[in-house]
Amino acid sequence: MDSVQTLNLALIGGTALLLVAALGLAWLAWRAVKLGGEQAAKRLRQIGWGGWALALLSILSLPVSAWWLAHLQPWPLDALWLLGSALLYIPAFIGWLLLAGRLQRLAAALQAGGEQVAVPRALTLLAVLTLGLFAVLLLLVSVKPL
C-alpha cells in the first residue's frame, strides 16, 4: 500500500475513532449522571481524563496527517471540502474543550450536592453540536468531493 492510501486510511480511521469514542464517552457520561452522588462524580472525572487524552491525540495527529495527505495529492488548496473541513476543525475542538470543562463542573456539582443534578440544556446542546461538527468532518474527509 502506498503512502497516500495509508494516510487516507489513517485520517478517515482517526476521525471515525474520534467520533465513536466521543459517542461512547457521551453515553458513559449520561449513564454516570443518572447514578448521582459521589459515584457519578468519580465516573465523570474518569470520562473527563479519557476525553482529554483523546482530544490531545486527535489535536496532534489529525491536522498533521491531513496536511501531509493534501501535500501529497494534487488537490487544489481552495477546494470547498478542504477549506470547510479546516474551518470546522477549529470550532469542533473548541466545543470539545468547552464540553470537557462543563463536564468537570458537573462532576464537582455532583460531588458537592451528593444527589442527582439535572444536566443543563446548554451542556446537551453543546454535546450534540460538537458531535455534529465531528460527524460533518468525518463526512468531508471520507467523501472528498472535488
Image: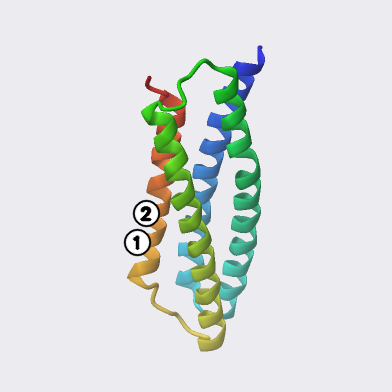
The circle drawn on residue 86 is none
Residue hosting label 1: 125
Q: Nearer the viewer, residue 89 or 47?
A: 89
Residue at the top extreme, as displayed: 1
Residue 26 is situated, as x and y percent measured from the top left of the image, at: 48, 57
- Tell me the amino acid under the disc marked 1: Leu
* Residue at 58% in and 38% down: 63
Report the side of 33 relative to 68 (left or right): left
Residue 141 is situated, as x and y percent measured from the top left of the image, at: 46, 30
- Mark 2 neighbour density, 10 Å: few (under 14) some (14–19) many (20 or more): some
Residue 74 is situated, as x and y percent measured from the top left of the image, at: 51, 15
Instruction: Answer above or below: position of 106 versus 28.
Output: below
CA separation in Å, label 1 and label 2: 6 Å
* Residue at 37% in and 22% down: 145
Residue 104 is situated, as x and y percent measured from the top left of the image, at: 55, 72
Mark 2 residue element: helix
Instruction: Name the quadrant of the C terminus.
Output: top left
Q: How many discs appear?
A: 2
